[in-house]
Image (cartoon, helix red, strand yellow):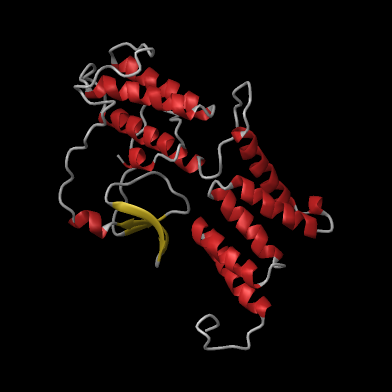
């Protein structure tokens, strides 16, 4: 109504509040990009909208825009009579500061706390027997949190609430083609990363996964990719033949998450 000029006598602060409150709804849905856009629009209309500035800091933090998130948060803290009294704002500042420290050059590799969202996609398996969660029965199963991928279902917030919904597109799709191996793990490829020595056995593959997970948790993401790739090469070059399908899948999935952290989207998709 406002932006289509159907109504012209709307105060700027009300226009700004509409954008800011929709941004907060996007945050609840974890739609960070949309939230950032709405907050920016709110601030164009009313630069003094402190809530919009704070919410944009939240969204930018989740999007990995830590410098601009800190700029927004500093503006918010300056507006507060006693910044230390706002626990949520101070906690967000600590999280952003931790991420900025990780980016800063350091003579020693620092072990840092994982960013929000990491626990839902935990790369370190607690058990060697990890396997995909069983698919729920029926068209929908309620779930407050993402509990792993489930064949034929997608996790989302829908008309029945948050949970696993039957994927109608996937159920109608043609059978998937065998996954193509990347050049680094192709059976015909030369041995990758010869400096990484592993037994040509299931134990060697397990060691590759364990070491890669450990490196990832230490923030050494590029090194973790090498170990995941070496483990995959052992499997896909047929050097080791008794590797369970779930372990093979976990190696690909965890390497994909490492690629995501490195913003290598095409490699992650593959």
Locate the C terminus and report the quarter of the image it occupies. top left
Q: Is residue 46 shown above or below 115?
A: below
* Extreme residue toward the right, this view: 81
Task: Report x, y in % for residue 263.
Answer: 44, 41
Quarter residue 159 falls in: bottom left
Of residue 242 and residue 56, the one placed in the foreground of this image is 56
Using residue 94 as the reference point, say whether residue 125 is left or right of it.
left
Task: Report x, y in % for residue 215.
Answer: 49, 24
Q: Is residue 160 shown above or below 146?
A: below
Using residue 259 as the reference point, say whether residue 67 is left or right of it.
right
Q: Is residue 262 visible?
A: yes
Using residue 100 as the reference point, say whether residue 206 is left or right of it.
left
Q: How many labels sit on residues?
A: 0
Task: Report x, y in % for residue 64.
Answer: 55, 46
Q: Is residue 31 visible?
A: no
Task: Report x, y in % for residue 96.
Answer: 64, 44
Quarter residue 243 falls in: top left
Q: Residue at x 67, y 48 (%)?
A: 70
Q: Residue at x 65, y 43 (%)?
A: 95
Q: Is residue 220 shown above or below 68?
A: above
Q: Residue at x 43, y 54 (%)?
A: 143
Of residue 267 and residue 217, the one placed in the foreground of this image is 267
Q: Residue at x 41, y 36 (%)?
A: 259
């Amino acid at each position: 109504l406002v932006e289509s000029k159907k109504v012209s006598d709307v105060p700027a602060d009300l226009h700004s509040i509409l954008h800011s409150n929709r941004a907060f709804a996007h945050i609840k849905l974890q739609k960070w990009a949309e939230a950032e856009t709405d907050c920016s629009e709110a601030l164009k209309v009313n630069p003094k909208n402190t809530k919009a500035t704070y919410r944009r800091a939240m969204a930018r933090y989740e999007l990995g825009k830590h410098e601009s998130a800190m700029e927004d948060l500093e503006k918010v803290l300056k507006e507060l009579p006693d910044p230390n009294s706002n626990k949520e704002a101070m906690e967000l500042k600590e999280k952003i500061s931790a991420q900025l420290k990780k980016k800063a050059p350091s003579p020693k590799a620092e072990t840092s706390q994982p960013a929000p969202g990491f626990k839902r996609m935990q790369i370190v398996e607690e058990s060697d027997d990890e396997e995909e969660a069983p698919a729920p029965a029926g068209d929908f199963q309620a779930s407050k949190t993402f509990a792993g991928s489930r064949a034929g279902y997608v996790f989302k917030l829908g008309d029945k609430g948050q949970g696993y919904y039957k994927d109608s597109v996937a159920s109608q799709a043609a059978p998937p083609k065998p996954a193509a191996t990347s050049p680094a793990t192709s059976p015909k490829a030369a041995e990758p990363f010869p400096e990484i020595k592993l037994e040509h056995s299931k134990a060697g593959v397990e060691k590759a996964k364990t070491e890669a997970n450990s490196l990832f948790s230490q923030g050494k993401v590029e090194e973790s990719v090498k170990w995941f790739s070496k483990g995959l090469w052992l499997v896909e070059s047929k050097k080791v033949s008794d590797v369970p399908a779930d372990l093979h899948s976990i190696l690909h999935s965890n390497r994909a998450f490492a690629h995501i952290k490195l913003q290598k989207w095409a490699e992650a998709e593959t």
